[in-house]
Image (spheres, rainbow, N blue to C red):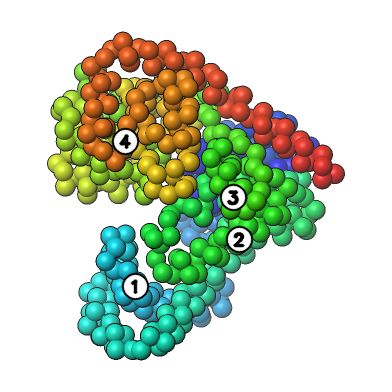
C-alpha cells in the first residue's frame, strides 16, 4: 500500500478542505497520514487516516493535554536555547520597536498603516510611544536622506534575520522530526516546502503542491508595511516559485486562481474545487438556531469561515442597523470574536452573534437551521476577487439561499444555478435590500431552495474528488 503524507500548518479541525482530502486519500486505497501544525481535539480512534500533530507525541490515540505539550516543548529547548532566549527576545523587541519608526515616517497617513502602527506600538505600551514620538523620531527627522535609507536597511535586515530564524525553526527543523516516509507528499502551504522538499529527495518521493489561495496577491502592495514590501513578500514569492517549479503537480481551488498562478509563475494548475462532502456529516448536539435561542419567527443569516480582512464587516453591521429587529446575523468560525468591539459599538449585541468554529464535519448540519447565507467577500485584492471559498459550498449543501457578492468565481456558480440574490457587500443599502427581498418573497425563497437541492448534488465532493484521484494515480505512475 502506497503512503500519502499530507501537511497543513493549521489544526486540521480548522481546515475542512485538508480534512476532506485526507479522508479521500484513505478512500482511494492509500495509507493516508496527515501532519498538522498544531494539535487538534479530534478523536483519533475514529479517523480513517493517521493524524500526527507537531508539538505532540507521535504515538497514541486520544487527546494530548496542554501540560504534556508544554513538557515536550521544554524538553526540546535544550541548554543552548535557554542561554540564547533572553538576548534573542531583547534584540527582537528592539528591532520591532525601531521598525515602527520606518512605518510611521513612511506612510502613516494611510488608514491601513495607521491601524498597523497603532497595533504594533501597543505591544510596547506607553514606553513605546514615548521612545518613538518623543525621542527617536525627532532625531530621525534631522538625518540626511542617505542616513535614513541606511537606518531603514539595517533595521529591515535585523527584522528579516529574526524572521528567517523563526521560519527555519518553525517550518523546517521542527516539522522534520514529525514527517514520516511517504510514496508521495501533499503540501497544503508553501511554508513547509523546504522540509517537504528535503524529505522528497531523501525518500525519492514526488510532492504535489495545493494552493488554497493566491498567496502573493492576498494584499495589494499599497496595504503592505515597508518591511513586508521590501523583505517578507519577495522572500515568500521566491519560496512559492521554488515550490511550484519543483512540484510534480499544482492544485488550486478555482479557475480564477489558476489564471493568477499561471500569470505569476507560468505554471499549469489542476482545479479541484472545495466542494462539501455530505458523507462526512455528523449531527451536532445543538444546531445554530437552538444555540442562539431564536424562535421560528426570527430571520437568521449566517456567515461561515475564518474572519479575514477581505470581508465587508462594518458594512454588513451597518446594514443590520437598517433591518427589522427580528433579523439576526451569526458569524461562525475562527477569530470571529474579534468582531465583538464593532458589534458593541453599534449596539447590536442582541442581534449579531459570534460563534466559535465547530468541527469540519458538523458545519453543514449546524447551520441548516438558518434562513440564508450572507457572503461578504469583496475585491480587496486579486486573491479575493477570484476566491471560491469553502463557505459557499457549505451554504449550498445546507440549502441556504445565498446573498452573494458579484465576484467572478462565486457569481458564476450562483447565477448558473440561480441560488440567491446578488449584493454589493460594500453598500449597506444593497445588503439591506437583498435581505428584505428574500424575507418578503416566499415564492422566491422556495425557488432558490429547489435549485439548491439540485446544486448540492452536482457540486459535491463525491464528484470533485475524482480529479484528485486521477491526479494522484498519474503522479505516482509517472514517478515509478
* 1 or 2: mark nearer the eye: 1
Q: In percent of the image, x 31 and y 85: which residue is there?
A: 140
Estimate the spatial distance between the alpha carbons at disc 4 and disc 1, rounded to whole Å. 33 Å
* Element marked by disc 1: helix
For label 3, the residue is 263
Estimate the spatial distance between the alpha carbons at disc 4 and disc 2, rounded to whole Å. 35 Å
Q: In the shown orientation, is residue 192 left or right of residue 232?
A: right
Estimate the spatial distance between the alpha carbons at disc 3 and disc 1, rounded to whole Å. 30 Å
For label 4, the residue is 424
* Element marked by disc 4: loop
For label 1, the residue is 106
Q: In percent of the image, x 52 and y 75: which residue is there?
A: 161
For label 2, the residue is 239
Q: Mark 3 and 1 residues: CB-CB less than 8 Å, in contact?
A: no
Q: In the shown orientation, is residue 225 left or right of residue 246?
A: left
Q: Quadrant of residue 433?
A: top left
Amino acid at each position: 500500500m502506497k503512503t500519502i503524507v499530507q501537511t497543513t500548518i493549521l489544526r486540521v479541525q480548522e481546515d475542512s478542505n485538508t480534512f476532506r482530502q485526507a479522508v479521500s486519500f484513505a478512500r482511494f486505497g492509500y495509507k493516508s497520514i496527515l501532519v498538522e501544525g498544531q494539535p487538534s481535539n479530534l478523536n483519533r480512534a475514529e479517523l480513517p487516516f493517521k493524524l500526527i500533530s507537531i508539538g505532540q507525541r507521535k504515538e497514541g490515540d486520544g487527546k494530548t493535554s496542554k501540560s504534556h505539550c508544554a513538557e515536550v516543548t521544554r524538553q526540546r529547548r535544550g541548554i543552548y536555547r535557554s542561554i540564547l532566549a533572553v538576548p534573542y527576545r531583547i534584540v527582537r523587541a528592539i528591532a520591532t520597536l525601531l521598525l515602527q519608526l520606518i512605518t510611521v515616517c513612511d506612510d502613516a497617513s494611510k488608514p491601513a498603516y495607521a491601524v498597523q502602527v497603532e497595533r504594533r506600538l501597543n505591544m510596547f505600551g506607553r514606553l513605546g510611544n514615548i521612545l518613538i514620538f518623543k525621542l527617536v523620531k525627532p532625531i530621525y527627522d534631522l538625518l540626511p536622506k542617505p542616513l535614513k535609507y541606511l537606518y531603514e536597511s539595517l533595521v529591515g535586515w535585523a527584522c528579516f534575520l529574526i524572521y528567517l530564524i523563526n521560519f527555519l525553526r518553525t517550518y523546517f527543523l521542527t516539522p522534520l522530526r514529525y514527517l514520516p516516509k511517504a510514496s508521495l507528499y501533499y503540501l497544503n502551504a508553501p511554508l513547509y516546502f523546504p522540509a517537504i522538499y528535503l524529505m522528497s529527495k531523501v525518500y525519492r518521493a514526488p510532492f504535489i503542491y495545493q494552493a488554497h489561495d493566491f498567496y502573493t496577491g492576498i494584499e495589494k502592495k499599497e496595504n503592505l508595511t515597508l518591511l513586508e514590501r521590501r523583505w517578507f513578500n519577495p522572500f515568500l514569492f521566491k519560496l512559492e516559485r521554488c515550490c511550484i517549479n519543483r512540484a510534480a503537480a499544482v492544485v488550486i481551488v478555482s479557475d480564477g486562481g489558476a489564471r493568477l498562478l499561471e500569470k505569476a509563475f507560468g505554471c499549469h494548475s489542476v482545479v479541484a474545487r472545495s466542494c462539501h462532502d455530505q458523507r462526512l456529516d455528523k449531527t451536532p448536539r445543538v444546531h445554530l438556531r437552538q444555540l442562539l435561542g431564536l424562535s421560528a419567527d426570527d430571520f437568521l443569516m449566517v456567515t461561515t469561515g475564518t474572519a479575514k480582512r477581505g470581508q465587508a464587516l462594518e458594512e454588513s453591521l451597518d446594514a443590520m442597523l437598517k433591518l427589522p429587529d427580528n433579523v439576526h446575523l451569526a458569524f461562525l468560525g475562527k477569530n470571529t470574536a474579534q468582531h465583538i468591539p464593532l458589534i458593541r459599538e453599534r449596539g447590536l449585541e442582541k442581534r449579531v452573534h459570534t460563534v466559535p468554529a465547530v468541527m469540519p464535519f458538523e458545519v453543514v448540519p449546524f447551520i441548516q437551521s438558518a434562513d440564508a447565507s450572507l457572503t461578504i467577500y469583496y475585491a480587496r485584492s486579486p486573491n479575493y476577487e477570484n476566491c471560491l471559498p469553502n463557505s459557499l459550498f457549505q451554504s449550498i449543501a445546507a440549502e441556504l439561499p445565498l446573498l452573494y457578492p458579484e465576484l467572478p468565481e462565486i457569481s458564476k456558480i450562483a447565477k448558473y444555478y440561480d441560488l440567491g440574490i446578488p449584493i454589493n457587500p460594500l453598500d449597506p443599502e444593497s445588503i439591506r435590500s437583498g435581505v428584505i427581498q428574500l424575507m418578503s418573497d416566499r415564492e422566491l425563497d422556495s425557488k432558490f431552495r429547489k435549485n439548491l437541492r439540485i446544486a448540492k448534488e452536482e457540486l459535491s465532493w463525491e464528484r470533485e474528488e475524482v480529479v484528485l484521484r486521477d491526479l494522484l494515480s498519474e503522479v505516482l505512475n509517472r514517478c515509478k
